Image (cartoon, rainbow, N blue to C red):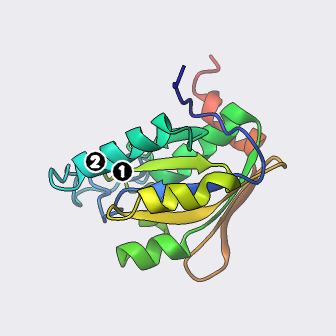
Amino acid sequence: HQAVTMDLKEAGNRLYLVGATKDELGGSHFSLVNDLAGGDVPRVDLTTAPPIFEVVHTAISRGLVRSCHDLSEGGLATAAAEMAFAGGLGVDINLKPMSQASGIDDDAILLFSESNTRFLIEVPEVHTGDFEALCDGVPMVPLGQVTADDHIRIQGTNGTPVIDTPWPALKQAWQQTLDW
């Protein structure tokens, strides 16, 4: 009865990234698609992972979380798109807070890093204060909100849009490899 799925639930809800983003594109889907070699592969930080898992578990147990998706396979851009597809809602995300928290100003790394122990979490506006207080002591940044339209909008670190696309077009491209 406390299961949380990945589909976005309601426009106006806030989106948060819990966990630390690192420059870890080695072995990622981004590297595969772009034929890149080398780079750092994701590593689990055994010091920060348990508190992050505890915070996410507690937030879910307290009913603060409407949806949640890990960022392991494909990173933030993929998780946000999959959540939008599943819920039939849009997202409006700003990478600037993520950049400030991580010290990374490369939009591609912020969008596609597959750093472990990271979650994109949807929280109703009424619960944001409790959620933010619960996250004290673990890496967490507010990224944006769920929207009622069908667009995935992601603003880059310099304030310009890096993605502004209707999610149905992205879903069609995502499913094309399965369309035999």
Hey, what amino acid is under mark 2?
Gly
Sequence-wise, the earlier of marks 2 and 1 is 2
Foreground pick, 179 / 69: 69
> Can residue 123 be seen in this snapshot?
yes
Secondary element type, mark 1: loop
Q: Residue at 36% of width from left, 73% of height from top?
A: 102
Q: What residue is shown with label 2?
A: 27
Task: From the viewer's perspective, tell me whether residue 127 is left or right of residue 132.
Answer: right
| 75, 49: nearer the viewer | 49
Q: Nearer the viewer, mark 2 or mark 1?
A: 1
- Coordinates of residue 66 in the picture (x, y in percent): 61, 39
Contact between labelled residues 1 and 2, with CB atoms less than 8 Å apart: yes
Horizontal side of residue 51 vs 91, given as left or right: left
Q: Is residue 163 above or below residue 70?
A: below
* The residue positioned farthest toward the left in the image shown: 46
User: On the image, which quarter does residue 39 sit in?
Assistant: bottom left
- Name the residue at 78% across, 48% down: 11
Q: Answer few, some or many: residues within 10 Å of disc 1's Cα (few below 14, many 20 plus, some between 14 and 19).
A: many
Q: Is residue 77 left or right of residue 53?
A: right
Please tell me how crowded label 2 is: few (under 14), some (14-19), or many (20+) other residues with Cα within 10 Å: some
Circle 2 SS class = loop
Rendered position, 106 above or below 20? below
Using the numbered discs, state the Cα–Cα distance from disc 2 to disc 1 in whole angstroms: 9 Å
- Number of numbered discs: 2
Residue at (38, 50) in percent of width and height:
118
Residue type highlighted by circle 1: Glu
User: Which residue was labeled with disc 1?
Assistant: 114
Which quarter of the rendering shows the N terminus? top right
Instruction: Give the image location of residue 164, x and y in percent.
Output: 73, 60
- Where residue 10 sits, quadrant-wise, is top right
Disc number at residue 64?
A: none
